[in-house]
Image (cartoon, helix red, strand yellow):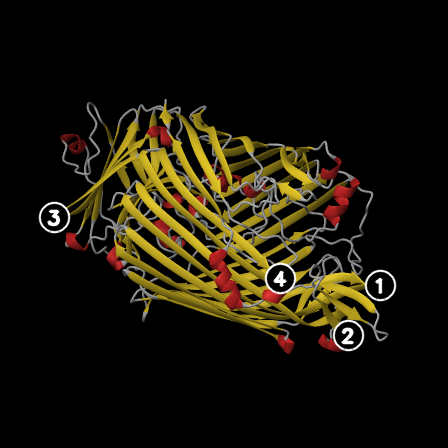
Amino acid sequence: MLLLLVVSIATAQEEEIKQYLTERIPDDPPSIDGKLDEEVWDLVEWGGDFVQRQPEYGVQPSEQTQFKILYDAKNLYVGVRAWDSDPSAIVKRMSRRDGFEGDWVEINIDSYHDKRTAFSFTASVSGVKGDEYVSNNGSDWDETWDPIWYLATSIDDKGWIAEFRIPLSQLRFADKPEHTWGVQFTRRFFRKEERSTWQPIPQDAPGWVHLFGELKGIKGIRPQKQLEIQPYVVGKAERYNADDEDPFSTGKDDELDFGIDAKIGITSDITLDLTINPDFGQVEADPSRVNLSAFRLFFRERRPFFLEGNNVLSFPLVGFNRNNLFYSRQIGGPPSYYPDADYVDQPNQTRILGAAKITGKNKNGFSWGLLESVTNREQAEISIDGEKSKITVEPYTNYLVGRVQQDIKEGETVIGAMMTSTNRFINNEHLDFLHTEAQSGGIDIKHNINERKYGITFRSAFSRVHGSAGAITETQMASERYFQRPDNNHKDLDTTRTTLMGSSSTLLFEKQSGSWVWEIGGTYRSPGLDLNDIGFLVQTDNIMQWIWSQYRVLEPKSIFRWQRYSFIQWREYDFGKKKTSAGYEFNFRSQLKNYWFIGSGLTFEEDQLSNADLRGGPSIRYPGGTNWWYFIGTNDQKKIRLSFNQWFFWGMENFRYNTGISPNLTIRPTDALRISINPSISWNRNDLQYISETEDLGGNTRYILGRVEQRTYRLSARMNFNVTPNLTVEFWGQPFLSTGEYSHFKETLNPNSENYFDRYIEIDNNLISYNVNDELFEIRNANSDIEYTIDDPDFNVIQFRSNFVIRWEYIPGSTLFLVWSSNGSDFHNSDENNFKQLRSDLFDLNSRNTFLIKYTYRFIL
């Protein structure tokens, strides 16, 4: 879990660095049974004297904690005694791995002793494991790192015990005669929501790993060369309603597939992860959304191979949005081309033929990561006038990502660089809209000042894409940039160019510790920047300045356990020096002494100028507005927890109104069962919603806007049941309904006018008629001639997605999955724009059901 790395750095630096002396086991190691009653544990003394960190730093914890550490040539052995004066009150909640429920203890090991990275192992009293790779001095905790290690726990009349065996092959350390490692122990005392640590570290310290205590006495061990091979076999059966007219819709698809994953320790500093023909059938589906904007949506990565260690290959352009040089969802995504045919059998995803990832770090603080992946040439089968054929919808593609970082002075300064490359092997004319190659790269520097109290960060990145003139023209005209805008006076559309280049830079200065923390920064993204072959980029042509400041009261005061008050100011321009956005936000978040959470925020937005909303037309100005939200949540230690979130947006000139509610109910009937229900309802009215671009009888371009009234209903239901710590039954389901009705059609006049009512003219309803047969609106002129038409923009989206998974890790690292997933969706026409009808149709969806059994076995050689 990401601890709150937040009562001054001076205090932290004054704390004495604790040391623990371990011993090598001369004979038989202890058996891992959660007892600590074998004589071998008498080789070392107890470590202890834990100090409370939360809620109040520096005081004695409610219950003390002690530990012992032993080692041999292959393993590190850790025993923890968590004292408790009332063992019957110990909370034994269970969860999936990395759930961090109930009482737990944790050891963090900085085996590199670089004071920036650590390996974290967590033992819940119920026996559920948690493990994370800690990087950036505690800023990033990667829960997807799943090493092989062994754990047993027990409860007695003195409290509870956790006993660990951590193979040295799962750690990384230098090859030298004697070692000093950084080490930290943390205990969560659940019923008082209290954290205590062995090495005292204030809550507002500017970091975590660099303040660890030290583990001494490890001698004569050698780095272990890890070799793990994990083959898999998966059987899949899909069932759906057959379509007699569609030759490809038979009602069933069956498949048997094989693949292999491997983890190889090339040297003590370098690890190679391999996957050949990977399968991710057990991965949960993406949540449903309706996108009315011009921009692409971000969906988080869910595939294990790409999740593990993904922070090593990350290069965000700026810390508060999704723009990044590497976005692993670009690898193995849906095919880029959809054929025009009577019937199409299209692959849902591009098959990944193989991928390799090399990561490492040496004793000099130099770390690196390299990812190589190759995806298949995908073909769709099509039918035109009864004739079947195949057509390529995605070419063979090679992806390469590389990242390096160098720590200087134990991480006080970190210098890094990154490069990416995408190469497509295009042999079909209809795929010429794709780039044949794309490269991006960047450098970043983080320098800490005054014992890490302050920090300066600089990042700079570039991109280059190459392809046919048509491909680069499409790139220039894409929603990220829209060079073709008629009022774009700083970047012209060039239909002859075959290469496009761009850049981005960010500079920020921050205060990282104390009651007041703040950040001042600026960033730009040039119009030609393009990262979306292997990265993620929403929009270019942007220059931004921001200030963020927060006042923190991190210890109990008055009715609060902790309080945070924040202020944010921002201002944005395009490269034509036009202001596109500006605003201010005030918010607070807190926890009360009764363990409830409350928070609220207020945002004031000035007029906004969008260069994208008219989809290549002129920029359009929107009035400003005010956004207010609040949140309240009850005590999450209880068996029943409720939370409620509501938000409002009021636009100036009454051009827009948005509100929504999102309650959440979590029930814990037993320690092994967790049920959560999260409904969400939102209402949106926007009088300036873009509808379409069309031409009138005179060949003039008209940009059509309208009022949309949208209602969206979703419910996310989740159930997790632990039969044992290693056998779980999980269910997730999400019904989703969204309706949008359009009215008050408008044409733009001067969309960038300072006067709101000069930006558009409303179309007279007497000139509008609806063509039922063609499902479009006809707009007539004064002579009753049809001037132009508008496709009916009303929408009604219905979806239901669910996953039911039984997951059994029958031995560490080897897993059996049983999966049932269902995915049904429909899109209704406007004459059925009725929520009552949609609710009824939700239960009649033509769902596609997938039944999957996947067996993996990990060989440790």
Q: Nearer the viewer, mark 3 or mark 2?
A: 2
Quarter in which the C terminus is drawn: top left
Expressed as whole percent of the image width and height from the top left, the position of residue 381 reads 64, 36
Front disc: 1 or 4: 4
Please give the name of the residue rendered at 25% of the width and 59% of the height, measured from the top-left corner. Answer: 192
In the image, residue 125 sits, relative to residue 676, either above or below, namely above
Q: Which mark is residue 767?
A: 2
The structure residue drawn at horizontal position 70% and vertical position 67%, both measured from the top left corner, is 705
Give the residue pinned by disc 1: 700
**Residue 231 picture location, percent across and down:** 42, 27
Q: Amino acid at mark 1?
A: Asn
At label 3, counting other C-alpha atoms closer than 10 Å, the crowd grade (few under 14, some 14-19, many 20 or more) is few
Judge the density around disc 4: few (<14), some (14-19), many (≥20) Cα neighbours within 10 Å.
Answer: some
Which numbered disc, 4 or 3, marks the residue closer to the eye? 4
Q: What amino acid is found at the position of numbered circle 4 in the picture?
A: Asn
Sequence order check: which comes first, mark 3 or mark 2? Answer: 3
User: Label 3 belongs to which residue?
Assistant: 157
Secondary structure at numbered mark 2: helix
* Label 2 CA crowd tier, 10 Å (few <14, some 14–19, many 20+): some
